Amino acid sequence: MTHPVILAHGGAGAPNEDSDGPQSACVTGMKFLTDGQLDAALRAVIEAAVVLENDVRFNAGTGANCRLDGSIQMDAILATSDGRIGCVAAIERVRNPIRVARLVMDSPHVMLCGPGATQFAHHRGVPDDTPITDKAKKRLADALERLKTGQLRPTERKWQGRDMHGTIGAVARAADGSFAVSCSTGGTSMMLPGRVGDSPIYGAGTMCGEHGAVCATGDGEEIIRRLCSMRVYLRLAEGMEPQQACEIEVANFPEPYTLGLIAVSRTGHGMAATANKMARGMLENRS
Ligand code: ASP
């Protein structure tokens, strides 16, 4: 037996002052980690993610960014150390994509995307609901303005055309030594409809196995190219402490792109982010 621990983040680049959000997600997650019921780590990361998806400050669920066409399409994933994975990509018209990822986990598939994912969710009783906020509309208007005027941020030059990302995620270790990870995002601010980032891609945005759980946030296309979560996980498998494993990955990430990571292993936990900027939380129960 080990002691339960949960970490959560509100996105690379999300102000550290907003860390009360991820911290309260950890408090909620910890209740599930310690309630003595089955699947503690999985239930903990789901409920932690729901807290953050429902917090308009973070770019997931209710706070999700709009695509350039004004639509809201979201990505989310859940994975456990016993090999269960459920993900949705570019899903629309649901408030909590992470709950749909849980339903996919129990289906014959690993990932559902686009209208198929939305249809699946509604058939399974998930309410039809578009979580669009005034903040998301304003971010879209600002992004369109930057495109029009050519005043793009360094990471947006490919659009000459893209930033303003954000994601939420949680990793947990239960008392029985099992791990789970959740990740949910509204993507970046300049995105075509249909774009899928790193978050729902196992090995890129998340990774979970017998050695631990890892969750990434930041510039999705770069995270996919480098399979960041897999690389951190492989360091955990070699026995490196999660803090060091995360720091190495962040230090090697190419400028001007942004990366944030949270990780937990059998022996420890860690988090790191570009310029140390990422709303974050952590809770351990040693009793
Ligand atoms: N990684 C997310 C994406 O590219 C965004 C983020 O984490 O900030 O969709």
Image (cartoon, rainbow, N blue to C red):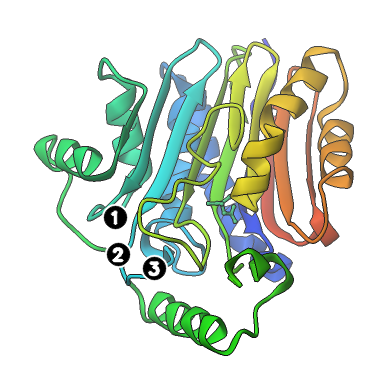
Real-space Cα distance between discs 1 and 2? 6 Å
Quadrant in which residue 43 is drawn: top left
Label disc, if present, on residue 131 of the rendered structure: 2
The answer to whether one can see residue 250 in this image is: yes
Q: Earlier in the sequence, mark 1 or mark 2?
A: 1
Q: Mark 3 Cα within 10 Å, few/some/many (few <14, many 20+)?
A: many
Labels 2 & 3 near each other (Cβ < 8 A): no
Mark 1 residue crowding within 10 angstroms, few (<14) / some (14–19) / many (20+)? many
Q: Quadrant of residue 64?
A: bottom left
221 or 104: which is nearer to us? 221
Residue 66, label in figure: 3
Q: Which residue is label 1 attached to? A: 95
Pick whichever of labels 2 and 3 is earlier in the sequence. 3
Say whether marks 1 and 2 touch (CB < 8 Å). Answer: yes
Element type at mark 1: loop
99 on left or right of 15: left
Residue 20 drawn above or below residue 232: below
**Image x and y of residue 270, in percent:** 79, 37
**Could one spot residue 6 in this view of the protein?**
no
